[in-house]
Each structure stands twice: as structure tokens, then as C-alpha cells.
Image (cartoon, rainbow, N blue to C red):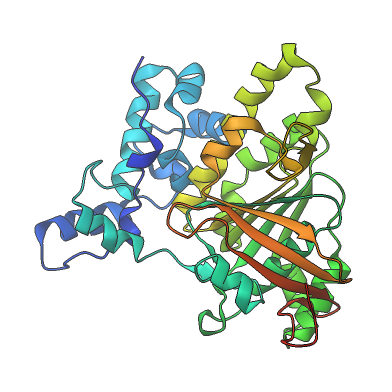
């Protein structure tokens, strides 16, 4: 069995700023332009290509970030290793680099505005690409509203806080409303019909269906220039289908695999990954929040940024608290407003917490 690559080693070469005069740059450019599709990879014939497509691997990017273990079960060790190695040569640099080089790579990360300056500031400038941002809270705290807003904002020009791309929306609780997308787009002076056409939607009926949709998302990512992936909500099906302690281990293993797939897609396509999460009561918490996010340690470890949303005494006003971040001050809070226009700043002096 060939060893799998760690997620941290998957650094997209196409995003790295390189010195075009160097030999390394010439090699990297050669790999970037060598393969246009899965069928172009050495060792991938019609039969192998069909097997890969059934597994959801329809692009070179998806193969470059594939789990070797999953592929070896279908293609065998030698074939899987050969195919994935070639795909990774095109998109992935050497596993090790200096910290100053990694800092240059970090400069390729982009951000999507939430529509609220205070919330953007809380997130360090907006929702960032190549990582998972989690919004959790009770029902009606604005999780899905933020998702709808981001679906429109990602289409904006970069100078307005967008990424000039589309959104992929996986809905597990039947909360997606295209009318809301059109309403927000109209407020931002975008063509509502065009804005709707740039949002690729799928409703997940079970946890397996939810995983299947994400596993087969790579072709949509390339075809529609997807720069935002949303799973709303991440945990709903897993909670309803895996009940009791005896099923907890299986649930967490499936959830972890699902999240790693999401992370690999975000890294490969320089896209932002946003998930919403439910909460559970914490009756033993005397000095902490009365509710906490579901998903356990698996979700806590993989989510890079976690934001807790709750209602304020004032109608339509919500409170966002940054709970976890690798680089931002945790515990910071801000107010935002949900209106017909979408997510907005609370006007100073007119709304109070």
C-alpha cells in the first residue's frame, strides 16, 4: 500500500508566485500546461477514466487532491499511485518550503465580503479562500441568510469584495430560497437572472447523498468557475441518521472524510468553503455559553474559523462572536442587521444591543 499524502503538502503550484527566469519556473509551467483533462494523464484509458468518473474524479485538480487509499481499492496500488503522482506534478509543489516562501503563497488567499463592514473586520477582511469558515447558532440567527448573501457577493468584481466567480450550494434542510438570491442581487445592481444562473444548487436527501454530491463536485467547480462552496447545514443528516453512542464513531469517521474532501476542493480551486452548524444545549455550563456547536472534536479541529451567531433583544439585529481563528483575536464580537437588502451594518446610534 502506498502512503497517502498529508493535506498540508497539497500546495497548488499555479497559485505560487515564481521567478519566471528560473529553471524551477520552467518546470512548473511545463506541468501546468501538460494535462488538460483526466484522459490526458498517462495510464488513463477509457475504462480507467470511466471508473474515475464514477468515483467523482473528473478533473486533474480532483485527482491531485485525491485520497490514495480510495483509488487503490478500485484501480490497484500501482495504477493509482502512477495516476495521482502525475496529477500532483501538475498542481503541487514539493512538500517542504521555507516560511518566507509559504508567506508568499499565503498572499494568493482572497476574501469575500459579507456585506457588513463590522463582520468583515471580525473575519479579518471577509470569508477567506482555501479554508473552512463555520457559522453556528440556534434557529433564526442568520446562518442561511449569510450563505445567501455570500452566494451573490462572490459574483461581485474584486474591487467590490467579490471574486468574480460562482457558488456551489448544498442544501440539507430545505432552506435555500432563489427568491432571496434575486432580491439581494437586485439590491447590489446585479442582474437577478444572471446571479441565479451563477449559483449551482443541489438538495442533499441523506448523509450519503450529501457526501456523494461533494465527491462529484469537481466537474462543476471547473465548468462554472466556482469560488465558493456552501454546505447548509453540515451536520443535520448526520445527527438524524446516526443516533446513540454506539453509532458515534461511524458518524464521526464519515463526517471527517466529508470535511477533508471539502478542504481539498477549497485548496485545489482557491475557493472559500462555508458550512453552517447546529447547536446543542450545555446544561453543565455555568460560566460559558448555554449552547455549543455540534460535530464534536472532528469539526472543531478542521474548521479554521468558527463564528457563533445569536439574536439580540432588537429585532433583525444579530450578534456575531469569533470563537476560533488561527490568526485573529478570539472572543471579539460585532453586530449586523438582516434586512430585505441582505446582510448590512447596524447604523450607529439607531440600533442598540
Number of marks drawn:
0
Left-right relation of 8 to 302: left
Seen from the viewer's position, the closer of residues 273 and 313 is 313
| Residue 331 versus residue 263 in the image, above or below | below
How far across and how far down the image is residue 35, in percent? 36, 50
Q: Quadrant of the N terminus?
A: top left
Residue 331 pos. (x, y %):
57, 57
Above or below — where is 308 with respect to 146? above
Instruction: Determine whether 288 is above or below 20 in the image.
Output: above
The outermost residue toward the top is 246
Q: Residue at x 86, y 66 (%)?
A: 313
Question: In front here: 322 or 217?
Answer: 322
* Figure quadrant of residue 258: top right
Left or right of residue 37: residue 81: left
**Residue in front for this viewpoint, 278 or 330:** 330
| Residue 133 seen in the current view | yes
Classify residue 190 as left or right of residue 76.
right
Residue 104 coordinates in the image, percent (x, y) = 27, 63
The residue at 37%/26% (across/down) is 4
Q: Residue 49: where, in percent of width, then height?
A: 51, 34
Residue depicted at x 26% and y 65%: 17
Classify residue 85 as left or right of residue 187.
left
Q: Is residue 183 above or below residue 92?
A: below
For the C terminus, which image quadrant?
bottom right
Work out whether residue 155 can be spotted: no
Amino acid at each position: 500500500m502506498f502512503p497517502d499524502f498529508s493535506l498540508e503538502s497539497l500546495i497548488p503550484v499555479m497559485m505560487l508566485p515564481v521567478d519566471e527566469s528560473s529553471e524551477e519556473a520552467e518546470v512548473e509551467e511545463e506541468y501546468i500546461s501538460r494535462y488538460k483533462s483526466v484522459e490526458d494523464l498517462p495510464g488513463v484509458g477509457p475504462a480507467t477514466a470511466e471508473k474515475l468518473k464514477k468515483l467523482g474524479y473528473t478533473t486533474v485538480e480532483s485527482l491531485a487532491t485525491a485520497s490514495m487509499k480510495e483509488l487503490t481499492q478500485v484501480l490497484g496500488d500501482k495504477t493509482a499511485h502512477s495516476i495521482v503522482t502525475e496529477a500532483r506534478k501538475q498542481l503541487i509543489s514539493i512538500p517542504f518550503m521555507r516560511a518566507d516562501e509559504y508567506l508568499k503563497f499565503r498572499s494568493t488567499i482572497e476574501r469575500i465580503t459579507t456585506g457588513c463592514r463590522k463582520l468583515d473586520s471580525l473575519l479579518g477582511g471577509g470569508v477567506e479562500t482555501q479554508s473552512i469558515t463555520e457559522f453556528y447558532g440556534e434557529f433564526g440567527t442568520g446562518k442561511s441568510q449569510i450563505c445567501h448573501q455570500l452566494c451573490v457577493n462572490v459574483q461581485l468584481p474584486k474591487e467590490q469584495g467579490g471574486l468574480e466567480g460562482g457558488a456551489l450550494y448544498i442544501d440539507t434542510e430545505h432552506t435555500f430560497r432563489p427568491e432571496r438570491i434575486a432580491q439581494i442581487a437586485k439590491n447590489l445592481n446585479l442582474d437577478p437572472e444572471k446571479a441565479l444562473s451563477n449559483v449551482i444548487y443541489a438538495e442533499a436527501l441523506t448523509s450519503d447523498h450529501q457526501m456523494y454530491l461533494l465527491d462529484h463536485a469537481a466537474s462543476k467547480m471547473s465548468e462554472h468557475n466556482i469560488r465558493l462552496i456552501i454546505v447548509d447545514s453540515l451536520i443535520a443528516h448526520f445527527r438524524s441518521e446516526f443516533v446513540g453512542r454506539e453509532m458515534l464513531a461511524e458518524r464521526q469517521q464519515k463526517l471527517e472524510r466529508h470535511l477533508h474532501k471539502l478542504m481539498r476542493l477549497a485548496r485545489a480551486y482557491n475557493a472559500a468553503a462555508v458550512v453552517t452548524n447546529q447547536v446543542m444545549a450545555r446544561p453543565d455550563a455555568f460560566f460559558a455559553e448555554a449552547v455549543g456547536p455540534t460535530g464534536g472534536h472532528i469539526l472543531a479541529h478542521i474548521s479554521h474559523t468558527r463564528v457563533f451567531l445569536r439574536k439580540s433583544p432588537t429585532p433583525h439585529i444579530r450578534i456575531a462572536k469569533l470563537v476560533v481563528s488561527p490568526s485573529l483575536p478570539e472572543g471579539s464580537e460585532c453586530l449586523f442587521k438582516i434586512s430585505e437588502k441582505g446582510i448590512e451594518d447596524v447604523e450607529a446610534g439607531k440600533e442598540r444591543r
